[in-house]
Image: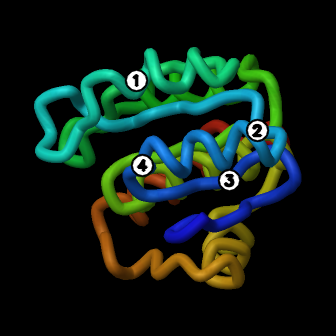
Amino acid sequence: MENVKKINNELTVAGQVTPEQLQQAASEGYKSVLNLRSPSEQGFISDEQQQAQALGLNYINIPVKPNEISDELATEVLEQIDRLPKPALIHCASGMRAGLMAFMNVATRQGMTPEQVFEKAAEAGFDCNANPQMKQFLEHYVSTHSQTN
């Protein structure tokens, strides 16, 4: 699949997926799709849920708007990620929100520091500095919600 970054054996993130990529994900053994796009976003595929479910994939849509992200919303998304059958494909428009949530999930579950998360994200090909607002949110969330706290 194009525009896809594997975070670990359970989580993979992507930009907007096509019906072909959903099919590919299902044939590669993915069990779930988590869409972080809002139905009002340009390019949102209105029947993505039906397409995913027809392929036997669990499907959840939790709209995350980058400028309206909150601790409560992040916690809801991370808890959904925990509950999803794995491996799971998490996507948004560009992969930035999906990467943010996937890395926050890994970081808070493994007791990582924000610095460790940024390092891991960079290794996976994410430029955390590309979106200072999201980087700052990750830093805040991970520092206050990591399981070592």
Q: Residue at x 63, y 64 (%)?
A: 114
Crowding at dot 1, Cα within 10 Å, few <14 / some 14-19 / many 20+, comes out as some
State the image coordinates of residue 54 (x, y, percent, origin top left). Answer: 57, 17
- Disc sitting over residue 12 in the figure: 3
Q: Amino acid at mark 2?
A: Tyr
Circle 2 — which element?
A: loop
Compared with 57, 128 (above or below) is below
- Look at the numbered disc 1 and give the secondary structure of its residue: loop
Q: Amino acid at mark 3?
A: Thr
Mark closer to the observer (4, 1): 4
Left or right of 131: which side holds 118? right
Q: Nearer the viewer, mark 2 or mark 4?
A: 4
Cα–Cα gap, marks 1 and 3: 17 Å
**Distance of label 3 from label 2 (alpha carbons):** 9 Å
75 and 55: which is toward the camera: 55
Chain-order first, disc 4 or disc 1: 4
Q: Which residue is mark 4?
A: 18
Q: Secondary structure at mark 4?
A: loop
Residue positioned 69% across, 19% down in the render: 56
Mark 4 burial class by Cα count in 10 Å: few <14, some 14-19, many 20+: few
Asked whether the viewer can see residue 20, the reply is: yes
The residue singled out by tag 2 in the image is 30
Neighbourhood count class around disc 2 (C-alpha, 10 Å): few under 14, some 14–19, many 20 upward: many
Give the number of the mark in front: 1 or 2: 2
- Check whether the beta carbons of the residues at disc 3 and disc 2 lie within 8 A of each other: yes
Type of the residue with mark 1 = Ile
Q: Which one is earlier in the sequence, the residue at label 4 or at label 3?
A: 3
> Which picture quadrant has residue 19?
top left
Residue 62: image tag:
1
